[in-house]
Amino acid sequence: MPKVTKSGKVKKDELPSTLQRSDKKAQETFARTLDSAEEQYGDGERAHRTAYSALKHTHEKVGDHWEQKGRKGPSDEQAKGGRGTSKETAGGVDANATKEHLYEVAKRLDISGRSSMSKNELVDAIQKANDRETRKARG
């Protein structure tokens, strides 16, 4: 089912909850890519993975929503490698960001112990905090 109307407006209520709480650009990126991917691959996991991959090039998951990144590009090794890659995804965390950026995100999410964490530990802690915030927002 298309996520964008014929007039080009995003059907917000048909988007995943994290995108419903995100900015218009995130919603449009995901919805337009999903519609295009569904035309090519059919309605299923591959189309959704394609849409999330496109979203992760411009946005990162922070808490229960997606925010525009300061730079465009893949967010992790999985997004960088494409379909044939078996690398692990960071679940929307911009693992390719600087340690300083990840620290600031961790600070916003009130992650304790962040000052002594390595970059990889920050990515893991942010991913867990994001999952927790998303579950909480769903009710």
Image: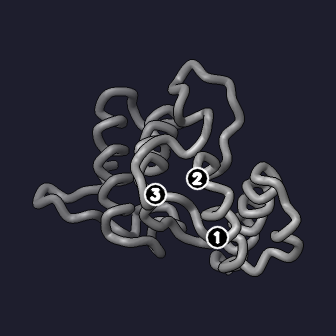
The residue at 50%/62% (across/down) is 16
* 42 on left or right of 132: left
The residue at 55%/46% (across/down) is 75
Residue 97 marker: 2
The mark closer to the camera, 3 or 2, is: 2
Using the image, determine if residue 73 lies above or below residue 61: above
Kindly indicate the quadrant of the structure image that contains residue 100. Answer: bottom right
Amino acid type of the residue tagged 2 in the rendering: Ala
| Whether residue 134 can be seen here | no
| Most foreground residue, 26 or 35 | 26
Distance from Cα at disc 3 to Cα at disc 2: 12 Å
Quarter of the C terminus within the rendering: bottom right
Using the image, determine if residue 103 lies above or below residue 41: below
Distance from Cα at disc 1 to Cα at disc 3: 13 Å
Q: Which residue is mark 3?
A: 59
Q: Position of residue 97 (x, y in %)?
A: 58, 53
Q: Are marks 1 and 2 in contact (CB under 8 Å)?
A: yes
Q: Which residue is mark 1?
A: 105
The mark closer to the camera, 1 or 3, is: 1
Residue 72 marker: none
Q: Callout 1 environment at 10 Å: few (<14), some (14 to 19), or many (20+)?
A: many
Using the image, determine if residue 122 lies above or below residue 134: above
